[in-house]
Each structure stands twice: as structure tokens, then as C-alpha cells.
Image (cartoon, rainbow, N blue to C red):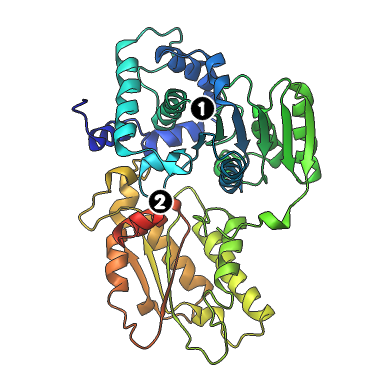
Amino acid sequence: MSSHTYQEAVEKLNSLQSNAATLEAVRASGGRLSQFAIPEMLEYLGRIGYSPDQLNALNVIHITGTKGKGSTSAFVDSILRHAKPDWKIGLYTSPHLVAVRERIRINGQPISEELFTKYFFEVWDRLQSNTARALESTSLMPGYFRFITLLAFHAFLECKVDATILEVGVGGTYDSTNVVPKPVVTGVTALGIDHVGVLGKTLEEIAWQKGGIFKEGVPAHTVSQPESPLKVLRNRAQELKASSFNVVEPNPRLASTKLDGAHTIESLQCCFKWFTSPGVGLPEKQDQTRPLRVLIFNCTSGRSGDTFIGTALETIRSQLSGLSSQETAEGFFDRVLFCTNITYADGHFKGDLTTLAIPEEDLAVLKTQQQLATAWSTHLPQYPTSNIFVLPSVEHAIRNLETLNTTERPLQVLVSGSLHLVGGVIEVAGLSEVAL
């Protein structure tokens, strides 16, 4: 019986995170560091005792895209589990909301803390003991996402899954998941300017990256895309000798109603359109009491808070107008809370939610949150500043909610802008068991 604990595993995993300075260096490089990503990942794979060909036994369905890849992965997982109830289905996704083990699921359930700990230290110890490296650029230990990807491969192989849905982290060509030589099928969801947008990539360049998961002799699928990036994807399929290239038409029966972190313009529009709907943020019937509405919002410092706030408010205006509602964007939210992703009021994160990617100087003065508050006031100059709160933690936000009088009106809280924020709210509000 191992003496290691789940908490130890999480602490060691967090030590592999890149800090804000490192992430900025990667952005400044224009992505040039990516050329070493796959060779380095293959070295790590070999150091834990696997060859790339062994990953083919996982029967991988490899999915990338800018928006919808998480939902698509979840759909495929559900469909497979219903179609093949006697199979063992592995699902690897990111990020997680509450516990890091959410990223590695078998038959719809996150692997247990015990299994996560067992497999974690098997991978950790192998990397620590097998230190021989062919590439100078390869560090002794992989970064956070690379390590979890290695852990997922190890867990799925040990558990002998019959099929694996593998969601790409970022991009495709250089992503840590892109070391499976022969997946069963590959797919690209909707393209847009997302994480790679900070590098100034065009849609065509993004399509080239995403198409990098196509493999020789393997069917390649995509949803309908704008003409130019679609051409890039088609060319990539030919270049990489995919067995076929298919543009999949939308299936209305698979429409998703999932409220994700809404961290892109497109998802923000969907999020606020959904919330500004009867039966959600609006009363379903005219004689119903108007709910007390609160927005909890944050976004990472690399994204445009002003643009996000403007998009959200314009979506509310458009939706209210289309519904011929008497309400206005100015009065839609009774209170807005801009808080950091830090979990607790004492300045600490829950272990699974720890992130080192926030510049310390930003946190010290709540720079991003102040910018969001300013943007809100700029777009809504009539909105009372007394109803705008800049807060240092998620716990502060939950405490703020507790000061509201909800005896006469129901409370509706929209949490948006960051999956890390959503996860923090779930944790502090005591909803973890429901979320898992």
C-alpha cells in the first residue's frame, strides 16, 4: 500500500505549472518554442516506459478545435457508453472545474483519488529515475499539461480501456496529445480566435495548427468552417494523407445547452443570450417576480476585458429588444462582482485549483478586476458604482452574495468569463459533489 496521498500528488503536479513570466516568454517567442514540443513529449513517453505505437491500443478518437471540442468530446463519450455498455471508455479533457482528476474519466466518472495517486507516482517516479535525455531542450520533468497527458495515457493503458476520447489542449500540431500515431478518427470543431490568438494568429494559421492532428490512413472530420480556413484543413488532410476528409452537417438533436466558462467572444454571446431568456434570467411569465440578478465575472489578463464587457452588454440589449422586454441592459444586473480566481479569502487556492499563471503584480492591485469595473462603468455610465464590487477572492464574492436579501425575490447568479472562476465558485459554494 502506497504511503502517498492525493494531496501530495496535487502539490507535486502544481510544482510543474508555468508561471506568468514563462508563459509571457512563450508568447513573445511567437510560438517558436513549439517545434520542440513533440520530440520532447516522445522523450517523456519513452522515459515512463512506452513507445508511441503502444498508444494505438487505446483506440483514440482525437478532437481539436477552438469552440465545442469539450462538448463534442462529452457527446462522443456518452454515445459510445450507450452504444457499447460493455466497453470501458476513457475520456481525457481539460481544464477541470473542481478536482484535477476530472480530466481523466473512465465510463463517465473521474478516476478515484486513490487511483489518481497510484498512477501519478508511478509516472513521477519513472521520470525521476530515468533521466537520460537525447534533446538538450528537454527538461528533467514535463510541464503541468504534459504530465497530466502522460498520466492519462498510463491510466488508460493500465485500466485497459476499449476506446479513448482524447481532447487536444491547445492547437493541435504541437499539442502534447498529438503523439498517438494511429488514432481511429480525428475531428475539428468550430475555429475562432482563442488561446492562440494572443500570438496574433490568423484563422488560416489556426486551421493549420488544428489540422495537425490528421494522420495517414485515418478519417478526418470537421464541422462547417469559413471558406479560407476550410481550404487549409482540406489541404492539411491531403498533406498528412488522411484516408478521407468530411465536412459534417449540424445535427439539431445534438444541440448543447451546456453554461461553460465563456472565455471567447462567441461563447460570451451564447452565454449572455441564454441567460437573458425567459425561464433563465428573465421570468417565464409576466406575473412572476423579477429575480435578483448578480454577475460574477473575471477574465485572464491576456484577454480584452473591455471587449468582453462590451460584448456581454450588447448581447443583453439585443436579446431584450428581440423579446420586446421592458427591462434594460443598464438595470439587468442588480449587482456585479469582479473577483480574482483565488479560491479563499486568506489568499490561498484549493490545491486542485492552484494557478501560477497570474502575474503577482496584477493580483497585488487587482489590476484586471479594476479594469473590468472601469469597462463596466464606461459602457453603462448610469449604473450605480455602489453596485460594482472589486474583490480579491472567490470566497469574498460568495460572502458578498450572502449579504443580499433574497426573502422576497429569487436570486439568479451568472458566473462567467473563466472556467477557473466557475470551479472556484462551485468549491466555495459547497457544490463540489454535485459538479463531480
- Which amino acid, mark 2? His
Residue 410 lies in quadrant: bottom left
For marks 2 and 1 on the same chain, the one whose residue lies earlier in the sequence: 1
Along the line of sight, the residue nearer the viewer: 413 or 28: 413
**Residue 64 x, y percent position in the rendering:** 61, 37
Q: Is residue 340 visible?
A: no
Identify the mark at residue 39; answer none if there is no mark: none
- Circle 2/circle 1 CB separation < 8 Å: no
Which residue shows up at 57% across the image and 22% down it?
Answer: 180
Up-down relation of residue 89 to residue 323 (above or below): above
Residue 403 in the figure: left or right of residue 57: left
Residue beneath label 2, please? Answer: 420
For the residues labelled 2 and 1, the Cα–Cα distance comes to 21 Å
**Residue 154 x, y percent position in the rendering:** 43, 24
The N terminus lies in which quarter of the figure?
top left
Up-down relation of residue 231 to residue 223 (above or below): above
**Residue 365 x, y percent position in the rendering:** 30, 56
User: 10 Å neighbourhood of mark 2: few (<14), some, or many (≥20)?
Assistant: many
Name the secondary structure under disc 1: loop
Along the line of sight, the residue nearer the viewer: 155 or 240: 155
Which residue shows up at 54% across the image and 70% down it?
Answer: 275
Up-down relation of residue 332 to residue 52 (above or below): below
Which residue shows up at 46% across the image and 28% down it?
Answer: 156
Count all numbered tags in the image, as a single digit.
2
Residue 72 in the figure: left or right of residue 302: right
Which residue shows up at 29% across the image and 34% down it?
Answer: 114
Up-down relation of residue 28 to residue 312 (above or below): above
Along the line of sight, the residue nearer the viewer: 229 or 309: 229
Q: Is residue 413 visible?
A: yes
Residue beneath label 1, please? Answer: 176
User: 10 Å neighbourhood of mark 1: few (<14), some, or many (≥20)?
Assistant: many
Name the secondary structure under disc 2: helix
